[in-house]
Amino acid sequence: MIILGIDPGLAHTGWGVVETRGPLVRARAYGCIASTADEPIDMRLGRIFREISDVISKYGPTDLAIEKIFFGQNAQSAIPTAQARGAAIAACAASGLTVGEYTPMEIKQAVVGTGSADKAQVTYMVRHVLALDHDPKPDHAADALAAAVCHAHLSRTYALSRPHNQIEELT
């Protein structure tokens, strides 16, 4: 399975592509789509759509793992993130990817083992699980890879928890 993970943001949308082979999960590529506040919103969202579409064309993922938006104290700051998330999901929908949505806590739990992990712990575990020889940078790309790893682990767990005859129906 090839999974595209996305950490949405208007200024920085991280992306990461992983491939699973049995119990192994390995990174194929990752990066970050950046824009500045002085650019018009339509140009920024269009860039996210186009660049995610290009990643999909190049790496051929079948699944999307994307972080759900956490509003926290400031709902106003969530609006641009929601717009970026929508542009990314639209690009994935146009290519027929299966969508998995995960909260930040679910991603941390799946990757680190605790939902209260900090960024350094997530980056360390992403590096370890994917057998990288360096920390993935920027942080947005590391978070996107974490979402993809989360999807890989949860998809495998879900498939293993199904009776054998139902696993055949899923494939």
Image: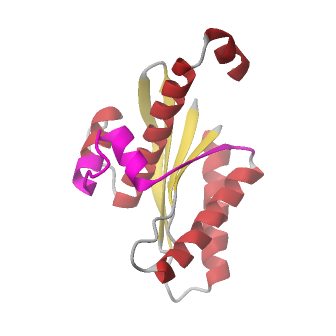
Q: In percent of the image, x 48 and y 18: which residue is there?
A: 22
User: Residue 149: x, y in percent?
Assistant: 44, 38
Span shown in magenta: 96-123
Left or right of 8 in this view: 126: left
Q: Is residue 147 magenta?
A: no
User: Residue 86: x, y in percent?
Assistant: 65, 65
Quadrant, the N terminus: top right
Left or right of 5 in this view: 128: left
Residue 9 seen anywhere in this rendered image of the structure: yes
Residue 138 seen anywhere in this rendered image of the structure: no
Residue 169 position (above or below residue 122): above
Q: Is residue 115 magenta?
A: yes
Q: In percent of the image, x 73 and y 18: which residue is there?
A: 169
* Residue 61 occupies quadrant: top right
User: Residue 135: x, y in percent?
Assistant: 27, 48
The residue positioned farthest toward the top in the image shown: 164
The residue positioned farthest toward the bottom in the image shown: 38
Q: Nearer the viewer, residue 33 or 123?
A: 123
Q: In percent of the image, x 52 and y 18: which residue is there?
A: 160
Quadrant, the C terminus: top right
User: Residue 138: x, y in percent?
Assistant: 35, 59
